[in-house]
Image (tube, rainbow, N blue to C red):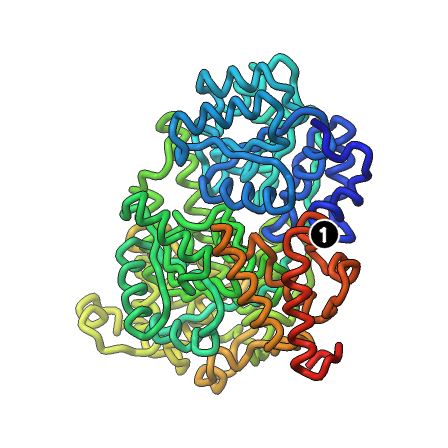
Amino acid sequence: MTMSAAMTPLETLKQYFGYDNFRSGQQMLIDDILAGKDVLGIMPTGAGKSICFQIPSLMMDGCSIVVSPLISLMKDQVNSLTQSGIPAAFINSSLNERQIYKALQNARDGAYKLIYAAPERLLEPNFLSFAKSAGISMLTIDEAHCISQWGQDFRPSYAQIPEFAASLPRRPVISAFTATATRLVRDDIADLLKLNDPTVLVTGFDRQNLYFEVQKPKDKYSALITFLKDKKERSGIVYCGTRAAVEEVCEKLKSDGYNASRYHAGLSDIERRENQDDFLYDRAQIMTATNAFGMGIDKSNVSFVVHYNMPKDIESYYQEAGRAGRDGESADCLLLYSGQDVHTNRWLIENGRDKEYQDKETEILLKEREHKRLREMTFYCTTNNCLREYVLKYFGEKPSNFCGNCGSCNTNFETTDITVDTQKILSCVSRMNERYGLNMVIDVLRGSKGGKILRFGLDKLSTYGISEKSERQLRDIINQLILAGYLLKTDDEYPVIKLGEHANRVLRGGETVQMKLAKEKEVKESPKSTKKQTVMKPVSRELFAVLRELRLTIANEQGVPAFVIFPDSTLTDMCMKTPVTEEDFLNVSGVGIVKLERYGKRFLSAIAEFLQNNGDTKTIK
């Protein structure tokens, strides 16, 4: 069954998905797939990866198999496709044997254009029998970084994919997609999947609609509540580092009047599924969760993501933060950092049970890489430079050093010559024989009379009490010196400060050091006072509320999440264009032929009634 072979990719996009233009990179990947080429697409969350394999699937003979890691992702994708008039199904453990048999039988009869399957299913006899007998036009691997041990989320089940592809009577086109992958992981994906001379497209990792900020509060929960004060009606995720933290934060939020739910691996399958559905269906406003939640969550109206604890690598952080603003609207990404987060992540790297290793040598090598990624993540949390620049440089891009939309760029920094302070700090670390941690170094520099200082005789050092800087200032400077390579912080359970490779440039080479440091008066300002104010689109909030209520009614009637009917961005476009005819409605971004036929009359009626009650005018209020 070929649904749209007579149409161009752009016509297919408009008819089924309701968009007039492709986003960056989509057309190129689609054209190459249709030409029979393997592709590897590295595209940030919200960039439209799914379109890149869904459009070719509609235009090719037979059906496509999409390997996906999570039940929730498959369910959302199939719901969205079905709403757009595209026959699709999923095969995973949420179905019983009778349902799986029926779905595979329908697939054999050509009932579907796309079949989503968990990687564990691929080599099961029934599924393999179907795949060998059916005309598989394309094999798509979503979240493709899961095949690489060098990535942040290796899953052994993904190792079955090459064997499955090789067992098919005719090799299909293979397409692979992921949101975050370093060059090492990209190369590994292409190699392990045995891609044939693939088109590799990295569209760029920048998500300009996301605002990034790092705070280092003494009381994280108070900082969270301050952040949430103006977000009573907005949907968001609060990621916590442990199950205990999820439980604690969720209960506190509930007691403070927030509609919060929870998600972690310690809950039963039933409760996790129910809580996730509550979030997806907007019955719960805030999801507090460990990193077990979220991969592939297709909820478009997540307007903030808070990391209550620091993740253990940039890849995980950017992927999780990227679940905000999928609809292209402005969204906030806040990370609440403390030194304890580093200790927790070190422990998880050494003792975590979420990874499997081929042998002891591989385990040692991979853990070394995880510790290196943790250092990179820690540097992100302590840098005073542009946060967006830091992330994009990590993924190999060459961005501007000022984005204007992050906590660093919008804080009142001044470039300060700290050569003398640097000399004092380096000399102190040297005279302490590079044996002590950050707090002890600061205490010696400030002349503390603490018991350990006196007991170890550190008050006798020439650098004792040599600095007049505050504890906060010294901590900030030392973190910047670590970032710049003048100092080194070990990865031990009890890390110590040592001289870095560049230390002698200052101590003996006469090098000067300048750094961006926050003005002391800025410390007392409200964390949100530095955020760039977003210019609101000229949209009637009253009309948006009417359309959102109608969308919820339809979603409840059909038993699907509201964003599956239309995302918020489509409702916003309706408010801006206020269509009065079916032709007008079809010009709304995100409205295709099928959705016009299904929902056009109800939405047009609601808009017409609103306009009539407000003076029968198309003026946006």
Q: Is residue 222 above or below residue 114?
A: below
Q: Quadrant of residue 600?
A: bottom right
Q: Which residue shows up at 42% across the image and 51% down it?
A: 312
Nearer-the-camera pick, 415 or 115 = 115
From the viewer's perspective, tell me whether residue 225 is left or right of residue 65.
left
Residue 246: x and y in percent read 31, 58
Q: Quadrant of the C terminus?
A: bottom right
Q: Which residue shows up at 53% across the image and 69% down it?
A: 384
Q: Secondary structure at mark 1?
A: loop
Q: Which residue shows up at 34% across the image and 71% down it?
A: 221
Nearer-the-camera pick, 483 or 179 = 179
From the viewer's perspective, tell me whether residue 542 is left or right of residue 96.
right
Please name the amino acid that badge 1 sits on.
Gly
From the viewer's perspective, tell me whether residue 148 is left or right of residue 388.
left
Q: Which residue shows up at 42% across the image and 65% down it?
A: 285
- Residue extending farthest to the top is 169
Nearer-the-camera pick, 198 or 161 = 161
Residue 409 visible: yes
Residue 302: x and y in percent read 51, 61
Q: Is residue 398 above or below residue 471?
A: above
- Residue extending farthest to the bottom is 521
Residue 136: x and y in percent read 63, 22
Residue 345: x and y in percent read 35, 51
Label 1 packing within 10 angstroms: few (<14), some (14-19), many (20+): many
